[in-house]
């Protein structure tokens, strides 16, 4: 069994694979104050609950954009699974040519998403990941990682609005139905959701222009993808498990 960790700034998504088959996946908070034993026990309990056996874990692979938590997770891997974790970074074959000024700068999650999406859908492609930040990545027809855009995430944007304006409350991220709203809560929801839909459609539109291909496939992933997908016109498909799938593919490429 392969244990795959996708460590984002808000959540860790954990997947257990038997070969190509995802047996189970879990989502828990990225908590830098948790110890390696706490993570070990958490995973132990999740496994027990699903009737899985810790001893069946043959390898651990981690993609992370949160460097301060890595010592803890690598230690968890060593202590509870007896494995040195494979960490996405220098020395790991991804099979993707990274056309960033400094390839080491690209978030590991973005590369892992790109690998999975290219394998699954072919190029050219745009991938939109609605996480703590919203990232847009462009992949060429030949499968090169061309770069992209980083925008503030929906949840942190709405938190900023609440924190910086005395009369604005914290609101639930749901569609208010109309753009012309008649109360504070709905007005904020309109600004967040419809404003964000505009951001997404505009960036994707510009990316397709720069790629020179109007038929570019657009795949969305991340915790908040569903909310925007229902309204945005440029997103073709949601693929919630893209990052885990990318980790499984990269694992197979490095084992072969
Ligand atoms: N299933 C969900 N439904 C609603 N909101 C979610 C869900 N999963 C995650 N979120 C929220 O979406 C945001 C991004 O989550 P996530 O994709 O896990 O981010 P990251 O990859 O940066 O850790 C967070 O603010 C989180 O609270
Ligand atoms: C842009 C990100 C913060 C997104 O992270 P997430 O929202 O998934 O937590 C992450 O991919 C990152 O730290 N990237 C490094 C900078 C770059 O990709 O150029
Ligand atoms: K992510």
Image (spheres, rainbow, N blue to C red):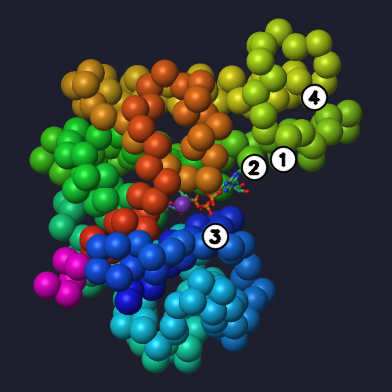
Q: CA distance from mark 4 to mark 3?
A: 29 Å
- The reply to whether discs 1 and 3 touch (Cβ–Cβ < 8 Å) is no
Estimate how packed mark 2 is, as few (under 14), some (14 to 19) or many (20 or more) residues with alpha carbons within 10 Å. Answer: few
* Residue at mark 4: 185
Question: Of marks 2 and 4, which one's residue comes earlier in the chain?
Answer: 2
Measured in 3D between alpha carbons, the distance from the residue under mark 4 to the one under mark 1, in whole angstroms, is 13 Å
The answer to whether the residue labelled 2 contacts the one labelled 1, judged by CB atoms less than 8 Å apart, is: yes
Residue drawn at 75 percent across, 18 percent down:
187
Give above or below for 140 relative to 207.
below
Helix, strand or loop at label 2? It is helix
Residue at the (47%, 28%) spot, across then down: 229
Number of numbered discs on residues: 4
Q: Is residue 138 left or right of residue 27?
A: left
The mark nearer the N terminus, 3 or 2, is 3
| Element on which disc 1 rests | helix
Q: Is residue 234 magenta?
A: no
Give the CA separation, mark 2 to mark 1.
5 Å
Magenta region, residue range? 252-256
Q: Residue at x 11, y 40 (%)?
A: 142
How far apart are labels 3 and 2 at the CA level?
19 Å
Q: Earlier in the sequence, mark 4 or mark 3?
A: 3
């Amino acid at each position: 069994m392969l244990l795959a960790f996708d460590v984002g700034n808000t959540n860790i998504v954990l997947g257990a694979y038997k070969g190509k088959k995802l047996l189970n996946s879990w989502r828990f908070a990225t908590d830098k104050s948790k110890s390696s034993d706490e993570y070990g026990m958490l995973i132990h309990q999740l496994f027990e609950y699903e009737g899985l056996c810790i001893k069946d874990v043959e390898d651990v692979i981690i993609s992370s954009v949160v460097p301060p938590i890595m010592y803890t997770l690598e230690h968890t891997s060593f202590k509870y699974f007896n494995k040195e974790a494979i960490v996405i970074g220098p020395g790991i074959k991804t099979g993707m040519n990274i056309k960033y000024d400094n390839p080491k700068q690209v978030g590991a999650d973005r590369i892992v998403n790109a690998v999975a999406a290219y394998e699954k859908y072919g190029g050219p492609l745009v991938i939109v990941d609605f996480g703590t930040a919203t990232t847009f990545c462009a992949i060429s027809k030949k499968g090169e990682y061309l770069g992209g855009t980083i925008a503030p995430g929906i949840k942190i944007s709405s938190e900023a609005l609440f924190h910086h304006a005395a009369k604005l409350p914290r609101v639930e991220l749901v569609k208010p139905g109309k753009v012309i709203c008649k109360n504070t809560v709905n007005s904020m929801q309109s600004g967040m959701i419809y404003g964000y839909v505009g951001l997404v459609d505009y960036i994707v539109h510009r990316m397709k222009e720069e790629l020179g291909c109007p038929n570019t496939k657009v795949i969305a992933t991340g915790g908040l993808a569903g909310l925007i997908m229902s309204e945005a016109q440029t997103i073709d498909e949601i693929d919630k498990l893209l990052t885990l799938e990318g980790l499984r593919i990269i694992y197979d490429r490095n084992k072969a």
